[in-house]
Image (spheres, coloured by chain):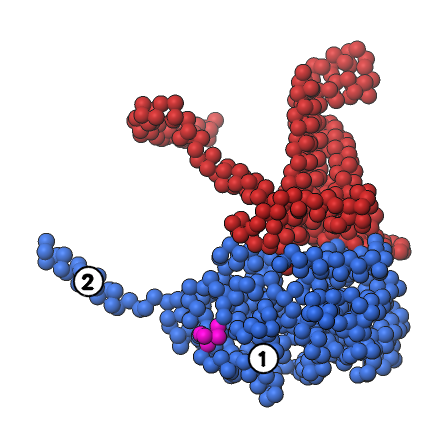
Amino acid sequence: MGMLRVALTAIALAACLAAPALAADIRIACYSDANECEVTQDLAQRFMQANSDIRIIIDRVPFKAIQESLPVQLAAGQGPDIARTTDFGAIARYFLDLRPLVKDAAYWDTNFADTLAWMRTDPNDKGIYGLPTQLTVTAPIVNATLFEQAGVPLPDTKATWDDWAAAADKVAKATKTQAGMALDRSGHRFAAGAISYGAKYFAADGTPAPIDDGFRAFADRFVNWNKTGVVEREVWAATGGGSYRDAFEDFANARIVVYYSGSWQLARLQNSIGDGFDWKIGAEPCGPAACTGMPGGAAFVAFKTTKSPKEVARFLDYLASEPVYAEMMAKTANIPAHAGLQKSGVQYDLPPAAKEAMAQFTHDAGQIVPLAYRLQGYIYSRPIFTATVARLSQAIVGELTLDQALARIQDDVKTAVAAAK
Amino acid sequence: MAEARPLNLVRMMAGRGLAAAYAGTMNILELPMRVAQRSLGPGLAWLFVGPNLIVFSLFTFLPIVLNIWYAFSGSTNLLPSQRPWVGLDNMRALLSCQNHFDPSSCQRDLFWHGVYNTLEFVVLQVTLMVALSLITALALNKKVIGQGFFRAAFFYPVLLSPVVVALIWKWILQRNGVLNGVILSAGGTPFDWLLDARSAFSWTVFVSIWAHMGFYTLILLAGLQAIPRDVYEAAEMDAAPPWTRFRRITLPLLMPSFLVVVVLALIRAVQIFDEVFVLTGGGPGTATTYLVQFIYETGFAQQIREYGMASAASLLLAAVLMLLTLAQLRLVRRGNG
């Protein structure tokens, strides 16, 4: 009996020693604009081969789940270790500061200075909360074939929003297209025009103050364009509340001439339109104050609830390293948020039209004014954008006058910010 | 006959097998049950009710208590322990208006738009739904060719997910949708069905009736089939015309089923959300924003999640639903009395 016990103990011990070290599981909630999750999966596979003590599990989820379910999960103390998100303000309080965990914090500071700030909650915060996986920029996407058919020249780099609207309307009428222009149903897209017309969005003391003469000037134009049919009315008016809706399908089916969206649409433009018609990225429309688009972008953010903070930092360090990051940008056709790569350039393997589009997007990104970065990085930017969409839609369908809509936007933002504090 | 014998044999064997399994199980259970009965006495009842009570408490009673707590507490924190008590502040904010008949004069105008839209929807949808269900049930109760097919056809939309229903109708009604395609091909002028406030509202009523009518028709059909034939035969012998038979026999005897249909349709109409949210998103403007959408957006869809405000609105909605249920009980009792 004694011999048997010794033998069993020896076998158990040997089994324990022979077993590989227990792998740390890192779960990533990932949504894709195009193929970001697939590319991350490939990179993670390579990372796991070199780091057998870490297992990366990528859960592909819809964007709506990131926006609506993730905050509730995190509030309940659950949630993934990492998530790909664009809505930093809503979940900033759950972010894990990676500064003490990453290999070289200075590398992160140098290369991601502008976009790391978007994940911070106040100007004195120096935390590193995640890896920006793309820099996006809004810009007009043009159906060049329709312009050519109508014999109307493309608006140049100094063209105002009014010039763009007039040109698009002319082309639409000449080619019997449904509408001249469309903007995604998003306060973020609207903000590009508003800032160009002089909107400041913030009061002198830094509190949000979206309504001013600049905002009013662009809102007035936008509501009128919707009423007169220059802008495709269905995109903003057919939906209620602050829900997002894009106009990509309208553009891809040549029902609109100019589509104001952003660089994240590049893969869809390539895949959906193909040889259907020629499309180009236009220069940023101007206003009296600027010719700017709005920046944006997603990031892989880490959460405090993770049981493996060191491993999370190791994986994000790997993704942030210049060659891996460059590969990720090239394969996902995104503009890098990495300053070094912005200078040296990414070798995109794209067809000529997409390459030309990427060059224009990169050029437009260089024109973004600081206020646009500030607004995008503001923790409560989403309530501003949501109120803009919901209330201007009411003005477009005639439920509110423009003045009433603007007053409601101001009230909604004030109420939302007060509720958050 | 020869083929029927083995079949009967199989049935008999299966029946015996089942009976033996049942008896065996009961024998195994008998001893522990006797012991439990002796030791627990009347408390044994709790053993049977317990599992259901636990499930009910966790998934029904606890959420109600939490909802009440959220409605009277503030902040955007999710955990109840982190939410400070604010008393009636949320209710006050919801109900604060300069003129309650003008939603735009209210502090929370979207809530009031939701209330008025829901009221209008309930009155219109329930009236039409009940009337159409009754007419359909009466038609399906007749002996017609393809009766089974028609019953299935009317019931089929009930089996569809609300999201599927909404997507189908969105595909039909959108600007470049099927309906405008048909109108165009017939030489007509297309119309923006979901861009005009009255049209969008009417379509939400129509789509919800289309999706749910089969269910209520089925209840009424069952009620109609339960009416004894001999009552009608007696009326026929008395030469009562069809309308009199309907008024004096069908309607009174159908009343219990009819009441169930009215109350279920009312409750369902007050809770309208899913189909409409996918079909119109509450638009154009706030033309189809109903109360539950306000609750959902306030509590879950916005960056700043006002759980307290959403819960306060839920409580008000619950109060309305309770009133409707009480009205149903009273009506049923009066009907029985």
**Helix, strand or loop at mark 2:** helix
Kindly indicate the quadrant of the structure image that contains residue A167. Answer: bottom right
Query: Which chain letter goes with mark 2?
Result: A
Please give the name of the residue rendered at 75% of the width and 72% of the height, measured from the top-left corner.
Answer: A200
**Helix, strand or loop at mark 1:** helix
Query: Percent from the top left, x then y, of residue B294?
Result: 69, 49
* Chain ID, blue in image: A
Query: Percent from the top left, x then y, of residue A15?
Result: 24, 64
Q: Residue furthest left?
A: A2
Compared with residue A283, is residue B51 higher up or lower down, i.e. above or below?
A: above
Q: Main secondary structure of the magenta part?
A: loop
Which residue was labeled with disc 2? A11
Q: Colour of chain B?
A: red
Compared with residue A196, is residue B315 higher up or lower down, i.e. above or below?
A: above
Residue B191 or A13: which is nearer the viewer?
A13
- Locate residue B321 relative to residue B43 in the image: left or right: right
How far separated are the C-alphas under marks 1 and 2?
Answer: 55 Å
Please give the name of the residue rendered at 80% of the width and 56% of the height, measured from the top-left corner.
Answer: A394
**Kind of residue at disc 2:** Ile
Q: Which mark is residue A113?
A: 1
Q: Tell if the residue under mark 1 belongs to the same chain as the one under mark 2.
A: yes
**Kind of residue at disc 1:** Ala
State which region is magenta.
Answer: A98-102
Say few, some or many: other residues with alpha carbon within 10 Å of mark 2 (under 14 / 14 to 19 / 20 or more): few
Q: Residue furthest bottom?
A: A344
- Locate residue A421 relative to residue A399 in the image: left or right: left
